[in-house]
């Protein structure tokens, strides 16, 4: 009972809405100052409301011999232009909470969103904000169905972790049909997703297809928690770990 209640509590925290209707993200707030400084070198703030989205890449190499320092580097890309972040220490500290450093060489890549809103009346306060997108939720039904082929649900709380691989090949001549495939793997056992079309639509919001051949690969966590009391509704989620 205790483990079930813990699982139900976790599911309610993670999922309070239906993710089958579209893609949604989990974000992690980070220090905004250095991100905004670098972003403004590319996209100048021209009014009180400033919003920028892009990609951030950070790395750190720890020296294993005296003087045991570390070489750190962070860059962000907006509209295909890249700028270095001058003081990445605070940002790297936050990123390591998402992806821990396990050796002397560390790297992290993610999408980011940053904003700076200046009040136009006294006290003219500025609200700066930056977030890293660290996960995405995708349609659940077919993923859970394929997962249960490998690991059956034996109680009200069901949780699986594995790998999702999806591909799409579009013919370049009429009738321009596409061949779609999604496969998930749990502990070295694989199962096909029967109808991958909705999943691929969601995945293509993360990584847009750039030609006739499209592929996507990510770790995932899927859960289904069924209430023990009427109306016995199940809370289901599938979460992709995009940048871990």
Image (cartoon, rainbow, N blue to C red):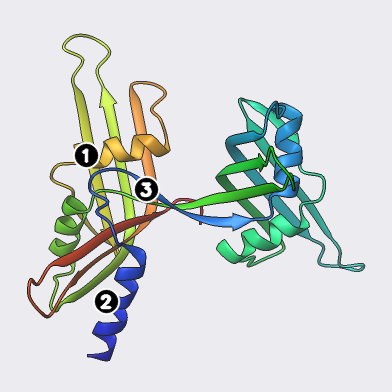
Q: Residue furthest front?
A: 122
Instruction: Select label 2 or label 1 by which is in front.
Output: 2
Of mark 2 and mark 1, the one earlier in the sequence is: 2
Q: Residue at x 31, y 62 (%)?
A: 15
Instruction: Select label 1 or label 3 by which is in front.
Output: 3
Above or below, 241 relative to 181? below
Query: Label 3 belongs to which residue?
Result: 24
Tag 2 and tag 3, C-beta contact below 8 Å: no
Query: Label 1 belongs to which residue?
Result: 198
Query: Label 2 belongs to which residue?
Result: 8
Tag 1 and tag 3, C-beta contact below 8 Å: no
- Seen in the image, is 231 located left or right of residue 107? left
Q: Secondary structure at mark 2?
A: helix
Q: Residue at x 33, y 21 (%)?
A: 212
Q: Secondary structure at mark 3?
A: strand
CA separation in Å, label 2 and label 1: 27 Å
Q: Secondary structure at mark 1?
A: helix
Q: Quadrant of residue 116?
A: top right
């Amino acid at each position: 009972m205790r483990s079930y209640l813990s699982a139900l509590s976790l599911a309610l925290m993670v999922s309070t809405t239906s993710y089958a209707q579209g893609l949604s993200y989990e974000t992690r707030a980070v220090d905004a100052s250095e991100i905004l400084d670098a972003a403004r070198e590319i996209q100048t703030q021209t009014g009180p409301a400033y919003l920028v989205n892009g990609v951030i890449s950070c790395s750190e190499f720890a020296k294993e011999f005296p003087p045991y320092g570390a070489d750190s580097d962070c860059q962000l890309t907006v509209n295909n232009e890249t700028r270095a972040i001058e003081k990445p220490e605070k940002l790297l500290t936050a990123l390591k909470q998402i992806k821990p450093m396990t050796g002397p060489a560390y790297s992290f890549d993610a999408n980011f969103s940053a904003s700076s809103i200046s009040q136009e009346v006294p006290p003219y306060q500025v609200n700066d904000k930056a977030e890293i997108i660290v996960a995405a939720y995708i349609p659940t039904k077919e993923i859970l169905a394929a997962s249960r082929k490998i690991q059956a649900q034996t109680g009200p709380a069901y949780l699986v972790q594995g790998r999702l691989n999806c591909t799409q090949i579009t013919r370049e001549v009429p009738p321009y049909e596409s061949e779609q495939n999604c496969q998930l793997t749990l502990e070295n056992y694989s199962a096909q997703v029967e109808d991958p079309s909705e999943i691929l639509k969601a995945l293509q919001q993360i990584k847009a297809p750039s030609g006739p051949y499209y592929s996507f690969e990510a770790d995932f966590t899927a859960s289904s928690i069924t209430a023990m009391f009427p109306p016995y509704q199940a809370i289901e989620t599938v979460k992709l770990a995009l940048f871990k």
